[in-house]
Image (cartoon, rainbow, N blue to C red):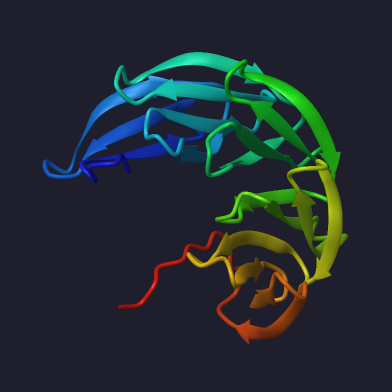
Amino acid sequence: MDSQSTRAFVPNAGDNAISVVDLQKRQVIKSITVGKAPHGLRMSPDGQMIYVANTDDGTVSVVSVSDLAEVARIPVGKGPVQVAFTPDGQRIYVSLRDENSTAVIDTASRRVIAKIPVGPGPIQIFAAPNGREIYVANQGTEAAPGNTMSIIDTASQKVTSEVVTGAGAHGVVVSGSGDRVFVTNVFANTVSVIDPVNRKVLRNIAVGAGPGGVTYAATK
């Protein structure tokens, strides 16, 4: 959603487009053409741009929220799935499923400035609230499941730790305070609850079959 919670942005992989939904009217008001098979998208911290990973053409599209149009398309590598902004908006990290790596984009120049090897088949990716770590869930494949979450240090641009989760680590999200990380394990049918300070799994929660994306909302 945008910063006013008036519009939602939905990637449509089969149409190579993003639908803009007016939440009050509950109707699509615009279709924005992007790259092939858009998948994961996130809005910049300032609410001005949306970055979306185009899985089938190895690019990330940059979409202007005010103009509702693609303003740039950045080549990143093979099989981009999801993106994650650092809190200051200066860097965006892109999981590259088919390269077993993460691309780092400088948002000012809109260029890839680094690639960081991670685990097999990285899917979802999320930044810590302090901006010092990036968490990457490594799913692998059904034949050879991955079962780790890579922790990238944003200062050194290197993986500093691998946390063993469950088979098929897919979705990842961080609590608002940054004291817990949650990873869905698509082949194990569990969610791992991780302490990012000690870098260990506190518990695995059994859920339904094939858990995918995950989000976090604080209780009041």
Q: Residue at x 64, y 33 (%)?
A: 55
Q: Name the image quarter holding residue 46.
A: top left
Left or right: residue 188 versus residue 164 is left
For the residue pair 109 and 141, the one nearer the viewer reads as 109
Residue 20 appearing in the image: yes
Residue 129 place in picture, x, y as percent: 55, 56
Q: Is residue 23 left or right of residue 130?
A: left
In the image, 189 versus 127, the foreground residue is 127
Q: Position of residue 51 (x, y in %)?
A: 51, 31
Please give left or right for residue 16 compared with residue 144 in the image: left
**Can residue 119 be seen in this snapshot?**
no
In the rendered view, would you say 204 is above or below 144? below
How many numbered marks, from 0 up? 0
In the rendered image, the quadrant that contains the C terminus is bottom left
Q: Position of residue 36 (x, y in %)?
A: 58, 24
In the image, residue 173 above or below residue 38: below
109 vs 59: above or below: above
Q: Quadrant of residue 194?
A: bottom right
Q: Residue at x 11, y 41 (%)?
A: 25
**167 and 150: which is toward the camera:** 150
Where, by quadrant of the figure, is residue 128 drawn? bottom right
Could you tell me which residue is drawn at 44 percent across and 39 percent down?
Answer: 45
Q: Residue furthest left?
A: 25
Q: Quadrant of the N terminus?
A: top left
Q: Position of residue 195 (x, y in %)?
A: 68, 76
Q: Is residue 122 above or below residue 104?
A: below
